[in-house]
Amino acid sequence: MSKLYSFKYKLDNGYTLVISINEKGINNIKKEYLYIFILLGIICFLLCLAFSLNHDKNKSIQQLIQQGLNKGEFIPYYQPIINSKTQQLVGCEVLVRWKRCNGEIFPPYLFIKNVENCHLIYPMTKSILQQVLTDFTQVQVDDNFCASINVTPQQLENPQFMAECINIIESQKTHCPNIALEVTERMKFTDIDKAKSVMTHLSDYGIKLKLDDAGTGFGGFSYLQTLPLDTIKIDKMFIDTIGTNDMKRDILKAIINFGHETNLEMIAEGVETQQQVDYLAKKNVHIIQGYLYAQPMPFCKFKRYIKQFSYN
C-alpha cells in the first residue's frame, strides 16, 4: 500500500480542512501538470511560428515590391479625360498597375498599401513619372493636355522629393505634357504649412494640383481654402447619386456650387451613363472621366486612342 500524506488547515469557522493524498495521486497530479506545461509550450511555439511567418510574409511582400521596381514591373495605365461639350481629349489620369513577369496584372488596391507601408511609394512615383514622360515622347497632344499622377500628402510635404520630380520633368521638358499631381483627400496632411510651401513652389513651376476624392475625407473644404489647388475631382460616390433619391446628392450640389464660386476646375470621376453626363452639363461641369468614355489602358492602346483626336 502506498504511503498516505495528509495536510490540515484550520478554517475561521472552527472547522479543520484535511486533504489526504497518496503517492499515486501525487504522480497523477505531476502528470497533469506536465501535460499542461506541454500544452502551453505547444501554444507558445505555434504563436511564435505564426508571428514569424507573418513577419516573413511582410518581408517577402516588401522584397517582391522592391524586385518589381528593379525590374520595371510597375507600369502606368492611362484613363482618358474628356470635355463632354467639345468631345475633345483634355487629359488623362495615370494609374499604376503591377505587371508580373508571368503576365499577371494587378490593380493598385492589391499592393498600394504595402508600397506605402514599406516606404517604397517614393521610388515608385519617380519611376511612374519617368515612364509617363518617356511614353509621351511618342505622341503629340494639345498644349492644354494634362497628365495627372497620384501622390500622397506626405510626398507633398517633402520638398526634397518634389525637387527630384521637377528635375525628372526638366530632363524631358521639350517633349513633356502638362503634369498635374493629384492628392487624395482620404489621407491626412500632417503639416499643412509645409505642404502649402511645397505646393506653392510646384504651382509656380507650372505643375497643376488637384484634390482627388473631394468631399470624402479629412480636409473637407478647408484644404481648398488653405492649399493652392487648381482642380477638384468629384468622387464617383457622389456621381452615382445622380437620378436617385440618395441624400448624398445634396453634397454633390454643394461641391459643384463651391467649385463654381471659387473658380476651380471640376472633373467628374466614375461617370458611367449619359444621364450623368447630361445632369453635369446642366450644372456646367463638362470635364468627364469614367467608363462611359474609356477604361484605363496601357500606353500602346492609349496611343491609338489619342489618334482619334486631331493632334497628329
Image (cartoon, rainbow, N blue to C red):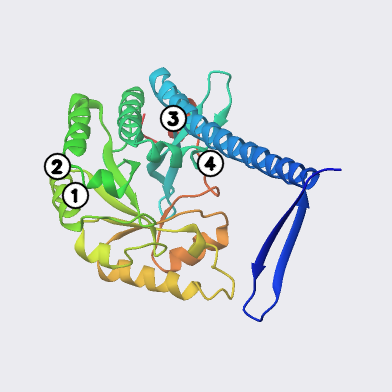
Q: Along the line of sight, which residue is nearer the eye, 24 or 133?
A: 24
Q: Specify whether 218 is left or right of 15.
A: left
Q: Nearer the viewer, mark 4 or mark 3?
A: 3
Return the residue nearer the eye: 166 or 281: 166
Callout 4: 10 Å neighbours few (<14), some, many (20+)? few
Whether residues under marks 2 and 1 lie with C-beta atoms below 8 angstroms apart, the answer is: no
Asked whether the beta carbons under mark 2 and mark 3 sit within 8 Å of each other, the answer is no
Q: Which mark is residue 205?
A: 2
Q: Is residue 24 above or below residue 127?
A: below
**Residue at disc 3, secondary structure:** helix
Q: Which mark is residue 199?
A: 1
Q: Is residue 254 above or below residue 132?
A: below
- Distance from the alpha carbon under mark 3 to that under mark 1: 30 Å
Q: Is residue 259 left or right of residue 55?
A: left
Say which residue label 3 marks.
62
- Left or right, residue 98 beside residue 130: right
Amino acid, disc 1? Met
Q: Position of residue 159 (x, y in %)?
A: 16, 41
Q: Earlier in the sequence, mark 4 or mark 3?
A: 3
Helix, strand or loop at mark 1? helix
Q: Earlier in the sequence, mark 3 or mark 1?
A: 3
- Mark 3 or mark 2, which is nearer the start of the sequence? 3
Q: Quadrant of residue 190?
A: bottom left
Q: How far is disc 4 from disc 1 in space, using C-alphas?
A: 30 Å
Q: Which residue is mark 4?
A: 295
Q: Secondary structure at mark 4?
A: loop
Label 4 is placed on what type of residue? Gln
How far is the residue under mark 4 from the one under mark 3? 29 Å
Return the disc, 2 or 1, that comes first in the chain's sequence: 1
In the picture, residue 260 is in which quadrant? bottom left
Name the mark nearer the viewer: 4 or 1: 1
Q: In percent of the image, x 46 and y 50: which residue is there?
A: 289
